[in-house]
Image (cartoon, helix red, strand yellow):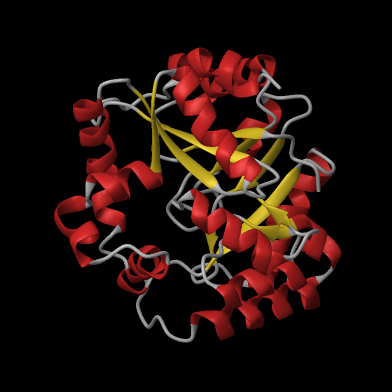
Amino acid sequence: MDLGRVGVWWSGSWRIDGEASVDVADELETLGYTALWSSGGFEPGLSPIFDRLLAGTSGMTVLSGIVSIWPTPADELSRAVAALDHRYPGRFVLGLGVSHAPMVEGYARPYSQMVEYLDALDAAGPEVANGRRVLAALGPRMLRLAAGRAAGAHPYLVPVEHTARARETLGPHALLAPEVTVVLDPDPATARQVARTFVSGYLTLPNYANNVRSLGFGEDDLADGGSDRLIDALVAWGGPDDVARQVRRHLEAGADHICVQVLASPTLTTFPLDSYRQLAPALLSR
């Protein structure tokens, strides 16, 4: 699966509706970004946005990042993906994840549940074959599952050290497409403040906290929303050239594709298109 080098994270919470989202997606494609990753879509209570993103672009791959396996039965999800593929052949890829214990009632045996869900998808038909799905994966077991039962892995909120370790675990051929969080601000104090506000909630979730612990970060690093050392490892910040250098480190460590998520002011509720415009020349140049 070739996603190109750099894609865009499109949060389901951005307030862009109808034709406006189509126009923004079209401009992102024109700028040279090669994929759109969006949260939400098929889960109950969330508006389906994949159709709009596919309609607004001509060649970009659109991926779910990430649909939880818990709320939607595999056969229902398979039908939804088949409907998208009928309208936009070969352009949608399903990203699946096991979510987190604090977010799912009755959360248990996440690895086994993922295996069972993949079995159910396979039984439902060819609509979501191995090559048309990726898994949210941090630890070695889920990474190995992503290599064997999917096109590859989409790790979220990870430092470069994780990308290198993930490549080693996945082997040379599976897709490795980490999300990289970005703050386009050269001031250390304000950039870290925006980053810490974002990261602090994730550090309360065991999957993310345990992942950074496994990479050598201690309890002091996880306290108070994250130490400067941890924030700098998880979030690329600075001017466009600084951010591009940090993103390229993931590619050099073994990533095939980077999903860039721009953080703007916490009060901003619209898509940060201007930041992606500013980043494009540095981020997309070879």
Is 214 or 70 nearer to us in this picture?
214
x, y percent for residue 237? 37, 30
x, y percent for residue 202? 31, 56
**Quadrant (top left, top right, bottom left, bottom right) of the C terminus:** top right
* Figure quadrant of residue 232: top left
* Residue at position x 32%, y 62% in the image: 217
* Residue at position x 78%, y 74% in the image: 122
* Figure quadrant of residue 102: bottom left
x, y percent for residue 67? 55, 58
- Give left or right: position of 17 versus 53: left
* Residue at position x 65%, y 47% in the image: 255
Residue most extreme to the left: 224
The answer to whether one can see residue 49 in this image is: no
x, y percent for residue 230? 31, 50
Q: Is residue 202 above or below residue 110?
A: above
* Residue at position x 55%, y 50% in the image: 65
Is 183 or 123 nearer to us in this picture?
183
The answer to whether one can see residue 144 in this image is: yes
- Give left or right: position of 276 versus 205: right
